[in-house]
Every structure is written in structure tokens, then in C-alpha cells.
Amino acid sequence: MSIPVCEHLHLEVDGAVLRVGLARESVYNALNTAMITELCEVLDWSASRSAGPAGLLSDEEGPLFRLLVLHGMGKHFCAGADINMMRDAGAKTPEENREDSARLDRLFNGLWAHPCYTIAVLHGVALGGGAGLISACDHVVAVEGARIALSEGKLGILPAVIGPYVYRRVGSAAFRRLAMHAGRVGTTEAQRIGLIEDVTPDHDAAWATVDGLVAEIMTTGPSAVSAAKELALGFDRWTGDDLALRTWTLDFTSRMRGSDEGQEGLSAFLEKRPPAWRPDDGGSK
């Protein structure tokens, strides 16, 4: 398997699990143009090698991905936008600033819509764009003491590009409050409003929790995982009437039941055996 070469990310492949480490430790993993570009490229690459859409567990290059774990190396998860990038924005034309924003939008949407189950491991701070990264993941495991902020307001700007992803996670009232006061919240408040799922006492416990999540997701059909996200995205974007929505869900269910994975899962249940996608079964589709 040809893994992308990155300067600002540390990539680790463990079978069907891809771990992506933000690796600008000296600046607390602040997002600059180069890191954002690398993240976009890695998300595109891993999505193209995801098991769910392919309907396969592996190909000639090895196992296809079923989970993506995003974490920060060093003292913090991500301190938001790099100060030099923000300083440069003042000298850029509106068109150039829009291009920068489009690159960020590609990053967050690529993570939000990624076909794998995505997990963020949060320690230290997740500010601005860092809060956007965790909001775009399916599951967030935080170490006690972590702090999160939609900090853009402190600079006189808005969390607009990350807004859709934070909004979908926490809802209107909580998003509005976080964006307006722009202050840091701890893990208790973040968990209360649904910004994170798990809180652990230390880093080791966080990674143990991640290992448990990985084991659980590996028992679920990879196409079912991807399709569940596709279903949620469909609900997010639905503009039709109620009857059309019900028809769409019926068609969706019929397609999944008739798929190779759906038939394998039902057969395995009736035959009281593990389905082919379980790691302890050793089968492949």
C-alpha cells in the first residue's frame, strides 16, 4: 500500500484502522495551509480505500479502511488556525481569502462525510478549527482537563466555516452561545451538550477507550457503517416532503437488505455463525 508522504501529519496503518496524528507539536498543531492541504489529501486517499463503499474487506494492496482515528501529537490536540496564516489574511484579496476558506470547508466536509467511522482523541485544547475537527468526527474521546472553544469571536471574526458541523452536533442554542461568548468549556459542559462522547482520566485510558470502540465497530458491517452515515447526511440535506422521505428510506432499506453484506449478515444470524467481516472469522467478501 502506498501511504501519502506528509510533513505535518504522522500516519499509522494498523490493518483496517488508519491513525492520523497532527504533528506540528511546536505550534500546538495549529492549522496552516500545508497541514490543511495534507489533511484534505489524506481524507481523500483514505476515503478511496474505505471498505464500506467498495463492499470489500481488502484488495490487492491490503486491508481496506474501516476506521479513522484523528489525534494530536505533543501537548495539545489543535490550537486552531496558525497565527501567521491569520496575519497573512489581512493582506490577501477577498478572492484569496475565499480560496483559503474553501480549503478549510473541504477539510471539514471531507471529515464529516468520510465513509469510515471516525474517532477524535482530544487532549489539551481544541480551539477554533480544532473544535471544527472534533465536531466533524463521529465519536470524540476526551482526556479530563481538555478545553474546547469556538474562539473566533475573540479575534472579531466568526466560526462560519466550522459552523455547520458544530451546529449539527450541539444544536442551535448551544452553538449560538459557544460562538457568542467564544470562551473555553471543559469536558463536563462539552459532554453535557453533546460535543464529546467520552471523558477519560488520562491518555492511556483514552486510547483504551478507542481500542474498545475499534473492536465494536469491527463487528459491524463496513457497508452498513458507511450507509448509516449516508442516511444521516440525507436527513441533514433533505428538502423534499414527508412522503418522499419515507419512500427514500424504504428504497434505502431494500437496497441494503438485498446487498451482499446484508445477505451475509442475515445468513450468519440464522446460521448462528460470525459474519465474514468480523476479525475473528478471517473471511473476506
Image (cartoon, rainbow, N blue to C red):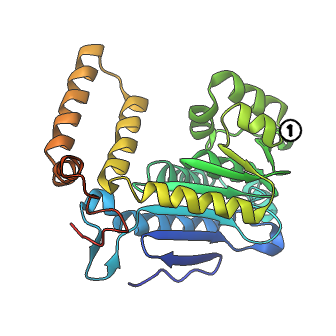
Q: Amino acid at mark 1?
A: Gly
Q: Secondary structure at mark 1?
A: loop
**Is residue 188 visible in this depiction of the protein?**
yes
Residue 122, given in percent of the width and then of the height, sits at: 72, 56
Residue placed under numbered mark 1 in the picture: 183
Residue 185, given in percent of the width and then of the height, sits at: 83, 39
**Is residue 103 visible in this depiction of the protein?**
no
The residue lying at 58 percent from left, 54 percent from top is: 104
Q: Quadrant of residue 157?
A: top right
The residue lying at 73 percent from left, 71 percent from top is: 73
Which quarter of the rendering shows the N terminus? bottom left
Q: Quadrant of residue 84?
A: bottom right
The residue lying at 37 percent from left, 68 percent from top is: 279
255 vs 26, nearest the viewer: 255
Q: Is residue 4 above or below residue 162?
A: below
177 vs 103, nearest the viewer: 177
